Amino acid sequence: MGLMNDIDLTELTFTRQAWVDASPADVYRLVSDVSAISRWSLNASAVAYDDGAGPEVGAWFSGHNRKDGKEWTTRSQVVKADPGAAFAFVVGGAEDGIVEWSWTLRDQGRGTVAEQSWRLLRTDPVLGRTRADLVALRDYMAVSAETTLTALAEWVTGQGSRPDTP
């Protein structure tokens, strides 16, 4: 079966959230330091900004990913960098990317509600060839985001809210 062109991309999104015992500024420093994602994500490793780049709009980074026994490297571009509030990047770049990951942070009590969202921007055979493939990918990524958020919250609690702690 060929890739379905009539897929409603709005259903291929999700947002998950967790409370983190750190300020929005500290959580932002953690999530915008893409090299730290392997501390919390089971799927990503060896993530690093290009030489001289950092968490600013337009910056590029590479990351190694794993899923279902497959491994690959992605190139992503930062599309939002609002310290203490929001950070987002697009896998494949802002111009022709396929997936946007974003973080939104807001004060709650002594900590932060951290929201992680995933949004499919366009279909691509590399992601799946049918609507069912894409829904399964979305669901897999939602579980991955929940795991990442929980691990981030637990790491902050165990480390204190010091973003510079390895």
Image (cartoon, rainbow, N blue to C red):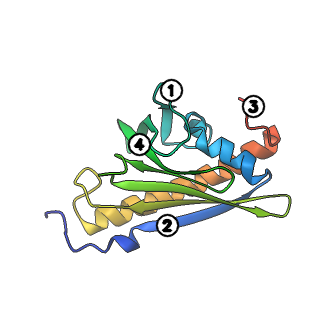
Q: Which mark is residue 130?
A: none
Residue reaching furthest to the top: 51
CA separation, marks 3 and 2?
30 Å
> Could you say which quadrant of the image residue 160 lies in?
top right
Q: Is residue 43 above or below residue 130?
A: above
Asked if the residue at tag 1 contacts the one at tag 2, i.e. Cβ–Cβ closer than 8 Å, the answer is no
Q: Please report whichever mark, 3 or 4, sits nearer to the chain's N-terminal start.
A: 4
Count neighbours of disc 4 (C-alpha within 10 A) and say few if under 14, some if 14 to 19, many if 20 or more: many
* Label whose residue precedes the other's in the sequence (2 or 1): 2
Q: Secondary structure at mark 3?
A: loop
Q: Secondary structure at mark 2?
A: strand
| SS of the residue under disc 1 | loop
Of callouts 1 and 3, the N-terminal one: 1
Disc 4 residue type?
Ser
**Which residue is at a point 73% across and 49% down the rendered structure image?**
25
Q: Which mark is residue 14?
A: 2
Q: Are marks 1 and 4 in contact (CB under 8 Å)?
A: no
x, y percent for residue 116: 57, 58
Residue type at mark 3 is Thr
For the point 66% across and 42% down, which residue is it?
Answer: 30
For the residues labelled 4 and 2, say whether their Cβ atoms are less than 8 Å apart: no
User: Residue under circle 4?
Assistant: 76
Q: Residue at x 18, y 63 (%)?
A: 3
On residue 52, the disc is 1
Residue 31 vs residue 4, the one in the foreground: 31
| Residue 45 % position (x, y) | 50, 34
* Near-viewer residue (28 or 5): 28
Q: CA distance from mark 2 to mark 1?
A: 32 Å
Residue furthest to the left: 1
Q: Which residue is mark 3?
A: 165
